[in-house]
Amino acid sequence: MPSNSSSGEVRFARTRRLWSALHDFFKSPRNGALAIVGVAVVLGVSFIAAEELNIRGNSTRFCISCHSMGAYVYEEFKTSKHYTNASGVRPECGQCHVSKRFWPAVWDHMRGTHDLVAEYSHDWTRPEVFEARRTKMAEKARLKMLDEDSHTCRECHKMEAIVPTRKRGERAHEDAKQKGKTNCIACHYNLVHKEAPLTPGFSEAIKAVAGSQ
């Protein structure tokens, strides 16, 4: 077996040869220009491909391709005012659950692989299995939206344009505007999907947010 010193010398020699080859290559202005153009093309194509995947990954059609999303979550969505309303506006799944900005959206999709793993590790064809995990999944979604100051909600809903139909809602919204509260999910956590009970973790998080405002 070669000694550590001889192995180090071999690696050093390889590094020197590589550096020398790169130096010789970039001595030519033409090669440098071609390299820059090549890198720009690769980055551009990669960005376009990532953006296209992001758009497709945000679509309702993509989301409901998983059994649990199509059989349970989407059916609940269809009975909500977010699906049918006077304005005719119907959001895609990603508009509520994925950031609008590119890199945060990429991160959201990476985090979403956990849901993909769950889809193949649980028998979601049995409603009782899904219901047993509903509260935990709801808490995860709520905490994410709370942590992000409900920014996906506020992409569509403008506080100054909302006209509550009940006195309680009027008072709550007026108080929110006066105090600069913007975290919609702190109050509206059972709007679109089947109701899930509040968890201690989410309740404490709401209090922490209220205390910081």
Image (cartoon, rainbow, N blue to C red):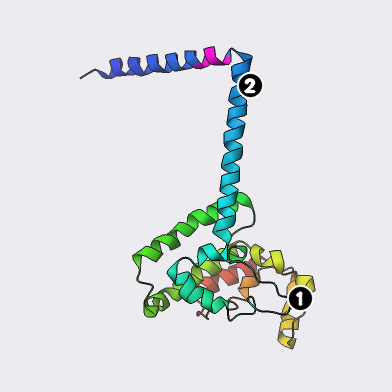
Examine the rendered structure and indicate whether residue 184 appears above or below residue 103: below
Find residue 113 and report its horizontal and vertical position in percent. 45, 57
Question: Is residue 180 visible from the viewing direction of this image?
Answer: yes
Q: Residue at x 53, y 71 (%)?
A: 202
Q: Quadrant of residue 120?
A: bottom left
Q: CA distance from mark 1 to mark 2?
A: 55 Å
- Tell me the SS state at disc 1: loop
Q: Residues within 10 Å of mark 1 (few under 14, many from 20)?
A: few
The one nearer the camera, 189 or 31, is: 31
Question: Is residue 193 visible from the viewing direction of this image?
Answer: no
Residue numbers of the magenta segment: 22-26
Residue type, label 1 = Ile
Q: Quadrant of residue 166?
A: bottom right
Find residue 184 and report its horizontal and vertical position in percent. 65, 71
Query: Mark 2 — residue?
Result: 33
Q: Residue at x 60, y 19 (%)?
A: 32
Look at the image and say whether residue 151 sits in the magenta stretch.
no
- Tell me the SS state at disc 2: helix
Q: Residue furthest bottom?
A: 167
Find residue 213 and report its horizontal and vertical position in percent. 68, 66
The one nearer the camera, 211 or 7, is: 7
Q: Residue furthest left?
A: 1
Magenta portion: prevailing SS class? helix
Q: Residue at x 62, y 32 (%)?
A: 40
Tell me which numbered mark, 1 or 2, is placed earlier along the sequence.
Answer: 2
Query: Mark 1 — residue?
Result: 162
Counting labels gives 2
Question: Could you tell whether 144 is left or right of 182 in the image?
Answer: left
